[in-house]
Structure formats: structure tokens, C-alpha cells
Image (cartoon, rainbow, N blue to C red):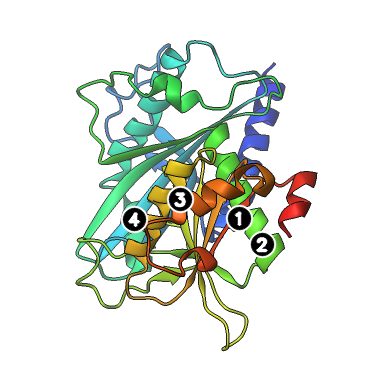
Amino acid sequence: MGEKSKKIGEIGENIVGNFFSLLGWEGALTGQSLTCKKSMQHARAGSKTGKRETHGIDYLYCYKSPLEGSTAENAIISVKHSGEPYENNPKRTFNEHAKDLVQTLECYKHSELKKQQQELVGRTTKSRDSGVLFWLSSNENTYDNVVARVANTRLDADWNFESFHVIDNKQIQFIFDTINHLREKEGSEQFYFYYPETSLSYVDKSISRYGKICPLEFLTSPLIPLIIKAKSNNDQDTFCLSSIEDFDQDSLRRLIQAAKEYTQDMSCKYLFLFPNYISSNHGDAVKKAAMGFENGIYNRIKVSSYRPDFRSLNDE
């Protein structure tokens, strides 16, 4: 049983490690160990000594945030992978996973490992330590959105952490499908993650508006903004928004408005991606969604699916 559990864990870490290549996170450190600074408080249940010596970190990725000026983002990553379906009531298991990661965050905060990583990232005025839990199931019969079932879980009031992200099957599949679709259609060199200007980033003029590194915040977002660079000087760049939610007219209208606000200083075309879009079913809704915007915007809009099937051949 122990060997099987270890094998399943290794599969999960391998999945996540390869997923990082889609995010531009190739430099993530693996298998790091921290000295526990709260050995009695963090002792595991059933510990013979009543103390904890170390915390293991599955992956650690540190980078300078493109969404917040002069900020180092430290992603402390835990991978929990199972061959069994997600539980019908997963809150207890979630609390166990979260507790282990939060305790790791507490000991990372003043660790030598953090100091080393800060030096590699370079000079910043602040840093943020974020817990990232990849909670995955490889069972074909599982439901996919376990985050929805733990969203209202009450966490221990004594837990001390800055930021916590949970990525489940639904979210990782959304990101995986979006990026692979664009790689196939546009080529991996043509598209970039788009970094919208925010109240936390606009004063830092050194921040580019796009790049190959996916910000941590996008991993739990229902939308991914991207830029597809034009292949010739005679063409325009394309601003892309990919949505985890199914297509509907009102959603597209809201995304058009958001895209216009994101790109107010750009001259570009627009691409909107949904999991289920089929032009023969939804084409009229696209025209209606574009009504009310300035003349000519419809001709700059393309809507497509990042999970195409044979019906998508009609869209070509």
C-alpha cells in the first residue's frame, strides 16, 4: 500500500512539473526541505517524539510579479494527487491538506531558503508568500470541481498566511486546454500572457504588459488574458480572453467590454475562447453581443472553442 501511495504521489508531482512548462515556470525548484521552527505546534498526529523536524516542499517558484510593482512572489507548492475520485464531502481532507501547507508557509517566512530565493529574484520592496495546493484526481469517474465543495470551509482562526490558491481538475484542465489550443493554432512563440495594468503596477514603468511567465493569480482565475503577436508588420496583434465558463451572449458582451478596457491604448483584434462554442449554434448570439459597441468592432472579433470537435470544422 505504501509503495502504491508513493507511486501515485510521484505521478502527481510529474504532472504538475510538466504543467509548469506551459506556465513558463521551468525554473521551479523541486523537493525542498525546511527546518521546522515550531516543532511542537506543527507536530504530526501520532508523532512518537511530539515534535516535527522538517517540512517538505514539493515545488518552489519565485519570481518578480508583473501585476504588482517591486514585489517578489514566492509560490510554495504542495501536490496532492489521488487515483481515487474526489470525496463527496471533501472538507475534512481539504483542512488536512491546507493545514500542512499553512504550517510550511509559517516556517518558510523566516527561512534561509527564502533569503536565498529573494537574492536570486533581485531587489524588491516587498514579498508575498503564497500557498499553492494542486489537488488532483486521475480517476475517470470523478467530478472535477472540488474547489466548489470546499469554498465555504471555515479555516482555523490561528492559521497565519498571506495568500492561498487551490487548483483542482477543472481549473488545471481549463488552463491546459487553453494553452495547448493556442500552441497548436498560433505556435508557442506567438502568444504571451497579458499583464493588465493595475493600481498596484502602473507606477512601475519597468513592467512589460505581456510575457511568457503566467502570474500565480491566473491559476485560479476563470479568465486568462493573453496577447497573440502578429506574424507580420502588416497585421495587428490579437488580444485574447479565455473563459472557463460556457458560452452565452451576456457573458460574451461582458468580455467584450472588459477587453476594450484592457486594450484602450492598443489597436488590436479580439479573440474570445470558450469550452463549448460552436458557430452554427452561437453565431447569431455573437452578432447580438457586439451590438451597441462602436461600428466595426464585430469585424475585429473572433469567437472559438479551446475544445473543438468535428463541428468546429465549420468555423474554419
Q: Position of residue 195 (x, y in %)?
A: 38, 64
Of labels 1 and 3, the one closer to you: 3
Q: As displayed, is residue 133 above or below residue 85?
A: below
Q: Nearer the viewer, residue 91 or 2?
A: 91
Write down the residue under mark 4. 73
- Residue, disc 3: 289
Q: Quadrant of the N terminus?
A: top right
User: Residue drawn at (40%, 21%), measured in percent from left and top?
Assistant: 150
Q: Amino acid at mark 4?
A: Glu
Work out whether mark 4 precedes mark 1 in sequence or the reverse, and give the earlier one. 4
Identify which residue is drawn at 51% across, 41% down: 244
Task: Quote the CA–CA distance across marks 2 and 4.
Answer: 27 Å
Q: Earlier in the sequence, mark 3 or mark 2?
A: 2
Closer to the camera: disc 4 or disc 3?
Answer: 3
Q: Helix, strand, or loop for circle 4?
A: strand
Label 4 to label 1: alpha-carbon separation: 22 Å
